[in-house]
Image: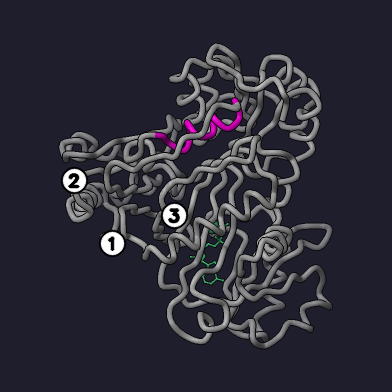
Amino acid sequence: MSALLPLLPGQTLGVMGGGQLGRMFVQSAQRMGYRTVVLDPDADSPAGRVSETHLQFSYLAPEGLRQLAALCSAITTEFENVPSQALAELAQHRPVAPGAEAVAIAQDRAREKAHFLKCGVPVAPHQVISNAEQMASVPASLFPGILKTTRLGYDGKGQIRVSHASDLPAAWQTLQGNATTPVTCVLEKMLPLAAECSVIVARGADGQQVHLPIQRNLHREGILALTEVFPGGIDAIFSQQAIAAAQAVAAGLDYVGVLCVEFFLLAPGPDRDALGPLVVNEMAPRPHNSGHYSQDACDVSQFELQVRCMAGLPLTAPRQHSPALMLNLLGDLWFRHAEGAPTEPPWQRVLALPGTHLHLYGKSSARRGRKMGHLNVTGASPEAVRATALQAAGLLGIAPF
Ligand code: ADP
Ligand code: MG
């Protein structure tokens, strides 16, 4: 990071990627008086639509990177799989947060797990498998397990559950797809989960860190379905441990920016006896779906934290002022009437419920599994929030929780 920080409002901030995370970053930056530039190859991206400038180039096109560096005083990413070479190239000209190396580690489950262990944070027992021969040496203790590609997996894609050692070769073959060189995978032991949670930390160039409260997450079919956050929602002991672990992970990367670290809270049993109650799953080098509640329930959102980090502005500890529950709005909700064309969900009825905050990403068409938006619900008590969220879910066709 450059000594020219802080970058004050009026300056221009750039973001690699034009998805919904980029859109909400742009909106936060604009609210604070910054101009924005989005680089995304897609002519019609959620962030490109709202940014002052949209550079339509592929992420490695030299001309796109040149223009981005020329227009912006600092650059961030909203997209985990942005080529790290592009960030390294940009960093020769402008402050880039997070840095290329941290993003490269987060893109690779094997490197990520090695980093967690280096920071003293437990991970699921696992083995990296780079070729067919290595499959033979996998210990029986890793079954039942989950085979995951080390790169490019998201929302439960790129992973297969493997009950027995005898099922491993078929799962490996499936994950190889049509690749011409072997796709490295990691086999993880399937752990009995009591809950899943995540912590979002923000770290400045000076090493100062702040964090959002611990979030409890529910996934359905590998995709985040909802996040619930209120004091006491996760035991204070685990919450403190998770926050300390997330901070250690960020410090160990010399990270600058917003980082989400996802954890498994283990159910009582031999795995928990061996590993401890908290195991880290993965990290995302950017704001995260599980932090969206902060837009309406905290005095500083995760997107404002991203702006502050990259601009070198002071980081003040965010305060959650309302219990919150976030419901993800997937494209499936547009297809709740069996056949036929998509129909818009009943927004009027949802918005009639007190404490509902609708966030839609401006995507042109709904598809099953596509993240179209989210609904934040806030209220006076966790019980009231949950009751309202259940009503909203009923109206939207989201299964109860
Ligand atoms: P993605 O990158 O697609 O989010 P994850 O590794 O986070 O992939 O896995 C998706 C979900 O699968 C997790 O949120 C969790 O519910 C489940 N899962 C993944 N790994 C394990 C494991 N080792 N033990 C138990 N459940 C797991
Ligand atoms: Mg995950």
At label 3, the amino acid type is Leu
| Picture quadrant of residue 61 | top right
Can you say whether 103 is above or below 282 in the image?
A: above
Q: Position of residue 127 (x, y in %)?
A: 72, 74
Number of marks present in the image shown: 3
Q: Which residue has dot 1 on it? A: 401
Residue receiving disc 2: 380
CA gap between label 3 and label 2 equals: 25 Å
Query: Could you say which disc has been placed on residue 47 in the image?
Result: none
The secondary structure type at the circle numbered 2 is loop
Viewer-side label of 3, 2: 2
Number of the label disc, if any, that sits on residue 224: 3
Mark 1: amino acid = Phe
Q: Which callout, 3 or 2, points at the residue further toward the start of the chain?
A: 3
SS for dot 3: strand
User: Does mark 3's beta carbon lie closer than 8 Å to ligand 2?
Assistant: yes
Residues at marks 3 and 1, CA–CA distance in whole angstroms: 13 Å
Q: Which residues are magenta?
A: 300-311
Q: Please tell me whether residue 304 belongs to the stretch shown in magenta.
A: yes
Please tell me whether mark 2 or mark 1 is closer to you in this view.
2
Quadrant position of the N terminus in the picture: top right
